[in-house]
Image (cartoon, rainbow, N blue to C red):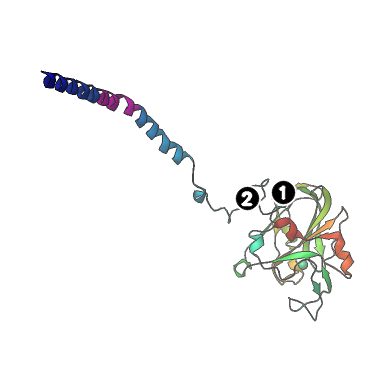
């Protein structure tokens, strides 16, 4: 009789256990399924960084510099371009990275070269900072040249954009240029648009509000009035 009643109790306990198990199988899993369904949705809603589209070929919006410096890139792929003449390099007709050379002195700007497939294309040039257009004209040594008055890091500067096609500069003198706004396009190489120079951008940044177009200074101390644009782009 004892055996029979203990077996009965065991069955009762096992039955209760199965009952509780079945109860949870139908009740608790509902909640777990909901949680599990929600989790993947959250994962999908957060895109992985690698999915971010490559914007390198498209100009960035006007008020968001592409992240490589305090100024906007004046030309597409600015840091991938060859700089035959960096800031401050001493040039003479006998000793120059460019041939033939007609200039001499210390280079006040940075030259950004064009790629071989860009020679016959319009290459847009963008305002590196927000500020007024204060000069556009034809000047010896440049062909078309534009100057813009800006503040960079709370300092007044005048930015010189050399070797532009003068007719492509649509803004009038005194008009404000937004940062990243297209100023014009590069002049055709070895033509009056560049005053006979190869197709490239000369970018000079002079301290203060005076419009100084000098591409070279004759003494190294003269460079103190100029800022190396590369330091603002990197
Ligand atoms: Zn230059």
Q: Residue at x 78, y 66 (%)?
A: 87
Q: Which mark is residue 60?
A: 2
Residue placed most toward the observer, 86 or 182: 86
Q: In the shown orientation, is residue 23 left or right of residue 139? A: left
Instruction: Relative to 197, say whether 225 is above or below.
Output: above
- Confirm whether the magenta stretch covers residue 23: yes
Residue at image point 36% right, 30% down: 32
- Residue 146 appears at what percent x and percent y? 78, 58
Magenta residues, dominant SS class: helix
Q: Residues within 10 Å of mark 2 (few under 14, many from 20)?
A: some
Q: What's the CA distance linking mark 2 and mark 1?
A: 11 Å
Residue 179, numbered circle = 1
On the image, which quarter does residue 75 sit in? Answer: bottom right
**Side (left or right) of 52 relative to 78:** left
Whole-percent x, y for residue 54 in the image: 54, 53
- Tell me which label, 2 or 1, sits earlier in the chain: 2
Locate residue 30 relative to residue 178 in the image: left or right. left
Packing grade of label 1 (10 A; few <14, some 14-19, many >=20) is: many
Range of residues picked out in magenta: 20-30
């Amino acid at each position: 009789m004892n055996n029979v009643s203990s077996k009965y109790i065991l069955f009762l306990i096992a039955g209760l256990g199965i009952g509780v198990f079945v109860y949870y199988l139908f009740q608790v899993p509902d909640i777990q399924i909901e949680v599990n369904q929600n989790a993947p949705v959250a994962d999908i809603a957060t895109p992985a960084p690698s999915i971010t589209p490559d914007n390198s070929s498209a100009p960035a919006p006007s008020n968001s510099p592409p992240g490589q410096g305090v100024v906007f890139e004046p030309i597409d792929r600015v840091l991938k371009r060859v700089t035959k003449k960096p800031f401050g390099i001493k040039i003479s007709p006998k000793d120059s990275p460019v041939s033939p050379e007609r200039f001499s002195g210390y280079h006040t700007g940075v030259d950004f070269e064009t790629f071989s497939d860009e020679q016959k294309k319009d290459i847009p040039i963008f305002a590196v900072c927000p500020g007024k257009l204060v000069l556009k004209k034809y000047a010896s040594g440049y062909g078309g040249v534009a100057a813009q008055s800006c503040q960079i890091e709370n300092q007044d500067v005048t930015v010189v954009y050399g070797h532009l096609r003068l007719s492509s500069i649509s803004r009038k003198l005194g008009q404000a240029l937004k940062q990243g706004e297209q100023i014009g396009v590069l002049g055709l190489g070895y033509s009056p648009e560049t005053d006979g120079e190869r197709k490239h951008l000369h970018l000079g940044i002079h301290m203060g509000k005076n419009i100084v177009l000098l591409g070279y200074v004759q003494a190294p101390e003269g460079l103190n009035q100029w800022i190396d644009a590369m330091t603002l782009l990197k």
